């Protein structure tokens, strides 16, 4: 560095002094004086430009107001049909109809009230959830009365009988559930319009001309209990819209079209109604100079529809300019260019050389000196400054390279430095292995000893690694991760790694405070010369994740077969909402038993994913992954809704019994500001009481100090929902009991080890159960696999238990059968004791 300083100093001393030449003001002033003479030409251009701008603004406003008026008028054309079918659906639900026959009677009654049915409606039908179907339709082109009937056969619901005066026939293999209008209407209770189509909804051509387009107004009919009975549909002729579009298109409008919510464009071309997908519609380009506007259609219950118009060229094109204005502008432009070119010749060439010098400096080409000869003093001054900058960069180039490849605090190699060192190993034969070491409890160390102590511990660990693996290259990937590149003949062995890990786990002393590091490690090796450093790092991170998950004491070597399931799960991308709608998710139920009596006193609801490629995936496998990518919100809402539905059916089957359902929550769900509202909707739908549901938080209980979390939990408690939180059995975890009133203390399998025999383990368990009792909480032991722990758990005061010994998670029917059997056995035992 001293040599570089001397060279830079010597070079700066030899930089020639740049004299003062012609100022830029003098060079620029002469063209400005000349341009003042030509300024009158600019007035003409400005005035004509403003005139064209005013004309364009007037045309755009005309298009906007005209589009809104036409949209309202077009919406009014569809209002009678929408109002009629929506009011008919309201009458059916207010009747109230509990069966499809009741709805069928309302449909057939419209024959007698045909004079009240809007003329656009040519067909009215109802498809039942069970598969039955009935409809009435007009047989004549201009007929006012519904003389035709379509209905499924009473003997065979897959046959559709179509009857009209003078004609009747049947359609086999008919299934109303496969009809687009039925599938679109059964999804939600909000009325919708279908996409335009040519054929009748019922599948016949008696009543309609197949060359004419139609729309279907679809409304779902629910019984008084809120269960869907089926879908009511009305076929509406698009002729009024066609006539409307034809009437409005002319010299004022080049084109008028309607864009539906289902993605089609309705327009009239050569007197014919044309329906085309939006993707095939060619809109006016910017170069066409045609004014195009789209506005939403608010009338006629056509939410999501848009009306689009294109003004005719007479209104869109700007006013043509006269020949005098272009001629004057051309003369002024040529004069300005000539004068500017003459004066710019004194500036352009040195500026080009200066720009080239700046590029070389920015690309760190610092060997050649900068030489810009010019009489313009400002350019000469800039050239001198850039030359000094080049010398400073040349002097500090080694420092920049060091900072690029090393951590500025610890001086250890960083990610870029390790990658650069690995690049130099690619041509070397033999094995190259990447060792990744992580301090799991780095957050605790940082909070207790400080970040500087953690950095010193990392530096100590790097020294240990280099001592154990001579010739290796070690660096720091983050504040808690060390990476080491080792080049060996036969590879690292487990004994060598064991010694290193034991040494890394030795207590670190800082200010008379001893702190041990919780170390996990993984290893990945180069499989071929094309493997990049980032590829080795991804493999090592995968093995490290596996080591953390399984709490491995030794190093984990990367193994594709071992990590296949984990990779498939973590790399999942897809539409979870669609997977739920496709029925890929279902619920299983695991019993919760009172230990003293053996009676099933509750149930745990667990989600299961039937993945099309990966097969069955349990909730404990995808729960943490979906927490990270946000899909837990959709799956969690599905679990809550299906759990409430299960509880509703259980109360109908066992009205005298009470069975609380435990539902696992993620903190990601609680961060949703509308989470409580999303819970109360299915609660009202299935008539669920708050004390019949227990929301359980098993992970990340340490984040329960967050105000948003506390507000959400407070709202759940206000609605009488019960809460259970899996607290850590330490002062930090139990201190949160003051803010979150949990009614259950979870006893995990770790606290159940060696309790079969008297000893310290059973003493600890008894203290935990006594703590739960004193805090007026229940204690729940999970993961019970054999009967040997039952007596010690009961003796220690544990209340409830759950695990494979009492039954694994099963389908709803299997659980209900097991519950019924458990109830019968306990009743028989009570009778024997009474006798």
Image (cartoon, rainbow, N blue to C red):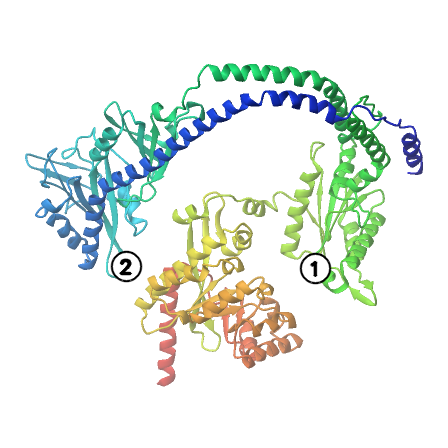
Please name the residue shown 39% across and 24% down the image: 317
Local packing at callout 1 (Cα closer than 10 Å; few below 14, some 14-19, many 20+) is: some
Picture quadrant of residue 676:
bottom left
Q: Nearer the viewer, residue 825 or 634?
A: 634
Residue placed under numbered mark 1 in the picture: 443
Q: Nearer the viewer, residue 533 or 387?
A: 387
Q: Can residue 259 be seen in this view?
A: no
Please name the residue shown 63% across and 56% down the image: 550
Quadrant of the drawing holding the N terminus? top right
Residue 199 tag number? none
Picture quadrant of residue 453:
bottom right
Q: Is residue 813 visible?
A: yes
Q: In this view, does 343 lie to the left or right of 802?
A: right
Secondary structure beneath dot 1 equals helix
Measuring from the top left, give residue 265's x and y in whole percent. 32, 32
**In the rendered image, the vertical position of residue 103 relative to residue 661, given as above or below:** above
Q: Which of 498 and 14 is in front in this view?
A: 14
Quadrant of the drawing holding the C terminus? bottom left
Choose the circle earlier in sequence order: 2 or 1. Answer: 2
Asked if the residue under mark 1 is in contact with the one under mark 2, i.e. CB atoms within 8 Å, the reply is: no
Spatial CA distance of label 2 from label 1 is 52 Å
Residue placed under numbered mark 2 in the picture: 226
Measuring from the top left, give residue 128's x and y in whole percent. 22, 50
Measuring from the top left, give residue 54's x and y in whole percent. 42, 31
Q: How many marks?
A: 2
């Amino acid at each position: 560095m001293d040599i570089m300083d001397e060279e830079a100093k010597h070079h700066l001393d030899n930089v020639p002094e740049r004299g003062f030449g012609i100022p830029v003001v003098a060079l620029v002033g002469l063209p400005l004086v000349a341009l003042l003479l030509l300024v009158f030409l600019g007035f003409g251009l400005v005035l004509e430009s403003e005139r064209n701008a005013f004309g364009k603004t007037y045309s755009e406003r005309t298009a906007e107001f005209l589009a809104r008026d036409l949209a309202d008028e077009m919406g009014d054309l569809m209002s009678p049909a929408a109002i009629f079918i929506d009011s008919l659906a309201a009458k059916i639900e207010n009747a109230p109809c509990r069966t499809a026959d009741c709805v069928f009677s309302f449909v057939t009654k419209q024959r007698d009230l045909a004079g009240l049915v809007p003329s656009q409606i040519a067909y009215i039908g109802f498809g039942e959830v069970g598969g039955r179907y009935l409809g009435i339709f007009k047989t004549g082109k201009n007929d006012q009365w519904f003389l035709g009937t379509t209905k499924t056969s009473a003997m065979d619901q897959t046959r559709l009988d179509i009857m009209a005066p003078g004609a009747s026939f049947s359609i086999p293999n008919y299934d109303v559930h496969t009809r687009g209008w039925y599938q679109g209407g059964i999804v939600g209770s909000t009325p919708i319009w279908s996409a335009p189509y040519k054929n009748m909804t019922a599948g016949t051509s008696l009543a309609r001309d197949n060359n004419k387009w139609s729309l279907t107004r679809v409304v779902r009919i629910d019984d008084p209990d809120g269960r869907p009975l089926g879908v009511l549909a009305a076929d509406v002729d698009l002729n009024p819209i066609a006539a409307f579009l034809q009437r409005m298109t002319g010299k004022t409008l080049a084109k008028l079209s309607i864009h539906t919510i289902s993605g089609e464009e309705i327009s009239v071309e050569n007197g014919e109604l044309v329906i085309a997908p939006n993707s095939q519609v060619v809109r006016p380009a910017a170069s066409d100079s045609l004014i195009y506007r789209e506005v939403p259609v608010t009338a006629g219950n056509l939410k999501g529809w848009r009306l689009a118009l294109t003004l005719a060229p007479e209104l869109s094109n700007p006013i043509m300019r006269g020949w005098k204005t272009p001629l004057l502008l051309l003369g002024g432009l040529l004069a300005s260019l000539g004068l500017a070119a003459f004066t710019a010749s004194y500036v352009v060439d040195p500026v080009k050389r200066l720009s080239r010098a700046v590029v070389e400096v920015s690309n760190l080409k610092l060997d050649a000196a900068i030489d810009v000869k010019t009489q313009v003093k400002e350019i000469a001054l800039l050239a001198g400054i850039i030359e000094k900058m080049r010398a400073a960069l040349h002097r500090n180039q080694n420092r920049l390279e060091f900072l690029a490849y090393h951590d500025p605090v610890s001086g250890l190699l960083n990610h870029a430095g390790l990658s650069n060192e690995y690049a130099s190993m690619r041509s070397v034969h033999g094995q190259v292995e990447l060792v990744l070491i992580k301090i799991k409890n780095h957050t605790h160390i940082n909070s207790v000893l400080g970040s500087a102590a953690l950095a010193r511990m990392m530096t100590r660990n790097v020294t240990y690694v280099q001592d154990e693996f001579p010739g290796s290259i070690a660096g720091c990937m983050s504040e808690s991760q060390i990476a080491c590149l080792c080049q060996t003949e036969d590879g690292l062995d487990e004994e060598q790694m064991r010694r290193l890990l034991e040494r890394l786990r030795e207590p670190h002393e800082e200010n008379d405070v001893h702190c041990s590091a919780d170390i996990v490690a993984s290893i990945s090796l180069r499989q071929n010369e094309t493997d990049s450093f980032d590829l080795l790092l991804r493999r090592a991170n995968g093995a490290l994740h596996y080591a953390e998950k399984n709490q491995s004491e030794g190093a984990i070597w990367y193994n594709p077969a071992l990590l296949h399931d984990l990779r498939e799960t973590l790399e999942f991308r897809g539409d979870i909402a669609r997977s739920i709608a496709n029925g890929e998710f279902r619920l299983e139920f695991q019993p919760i038993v009172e230990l003293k009596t053996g009676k099933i006193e509750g149930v745990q609801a667990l989600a299961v994913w039937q993945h099309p490629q990966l097969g069955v995936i349990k909730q404990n496998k995808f729960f943490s992954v979906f927490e990270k990518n946000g899909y837990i919100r959709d799956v969690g809402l599905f679990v809550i809704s299906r759990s409430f539905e299960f509880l509703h059916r259980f109360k109908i089957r066992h009205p005298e019994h009470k069975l609380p359902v435990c539902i696992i929550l993620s903190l990601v769900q609680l961060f949703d500001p509308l989470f409580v509202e999303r819970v109360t909707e299915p609660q009202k739908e299935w008539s669920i009481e708050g004390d019949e549901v227990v929301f359980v938080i098993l992970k990340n209980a340490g984040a329960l100090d967050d105000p948003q979390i506390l507000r959400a939990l407070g709202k759940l408690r206000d609605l009488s929902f019960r809460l259970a939180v899996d607290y850590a059995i330490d002062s930090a975890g139990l201190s949160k009991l003051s803010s979150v009133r949990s009614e259950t203390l979870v006893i995990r399998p770790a606290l159940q080890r060696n309790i079969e025999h008297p000893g310290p383990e059973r003493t600890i368990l008894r203290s935990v159960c006594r703590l739960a009792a004193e805090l007026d909480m229940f204690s729940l032991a999970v993961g019970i696999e054999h009967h040997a722990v039952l007596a010690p758990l009961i003796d220690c005061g544990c209340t409830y238990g759950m695990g494979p010994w009492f039954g694994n998670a099963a389908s709803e029917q299997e659980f209900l059968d097991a519950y019924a059997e458990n109830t019968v056995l306990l009743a028989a035992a009570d009778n024997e004791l009474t006798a």
